[in-house]
Image (cartoon, rainbow, N blue to C red):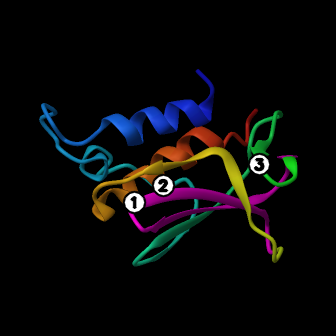
Amino acid sequence: MDRGEALLAVVGHDRGEGHPHGHVGELLMGEEAVAEQVATADSRTTDIVPGPGGVMTDEVGVVTGELTLRTEFSDGQVTLRVQYKDADEWYVVTGGRAPLADPADLAGVHTIAVGLLHRPEG
């Protein structure tokens, strides 16, 4: 299972049913942020440095180096996007789209995505 599949597995299967903690966001409460996060009602943004393999995107293939990750919620779907830090263009992370029933889970999904993609030590 690659990192994108792991994220989709968490997003797609964690509906809070049968889990003592409920939603994804509740599972991650108390976790320290890897980098400063910027939050709006429908998105979360964090600067990341991926491992040696970079991050695969739908539009341009692999991107590497200092990146910004944005997790967006719109119309019942979460989408992961990356950009080269301080650039204008955003690219969809391959495998980074999934249904999200509860917008309250956006922060948790973002935290998981940062945990999967931020690998500054390789």
Which secondary structure, mark 3?
Answer: strand
How much space separates mark 3 and mark 2, taking CA atoms? 17 Å
Q: Which residue is mark 1?
A: 107
Q: State left or right for residue 7 relative to residue 66.
A: left
* Numbered circle sitting on residue 19: none
Chief secondary structure of the magenta portion: strand
Q: Which corner quadrant of the image does residue 62 belong to?
A: top right
Q: Amino acid at mark 2?
A: His
Name which of mark 3 and mark 2 comes first in the sequence: 3
In magenta segment, residue 69: yes
Q: Residue at x 55, y 57 (%)?
A: 79
Q: Which residue is mark 3?
A: 57
Tell me the kind of residue under disc 3: Thr
Between 42 and 118, the residue placed more toward the observer is 42
The span picked out in magenta is 62-86
Tell whether label 2 touches label 3 (CB within 8 Å): no
Specify the farthest residue to the front: 75
Do tag 2 and tag 1 residues touch (Cβ < 8 Å)? yes
Find the distance from the CA under tag 2 to the CA under tag 1: 5 Å
List x then y, in percent, for residue 111. Answer: 46, 51
Q: Residues within 10 Å of mark 3 (few under 14, many from 20)?
A: many
Q: Amino acid at mark 1?
A: Ala
Q: Secondary structure at mark 1?
A: helix
**Residue 109 position within the rendered picture, expressed as x and y whole percent measured from the top left:** 43, 51
Disc sitting over residue 110 in the figure: 2
Q: Is residue 103 above or below residue 65?
A: below
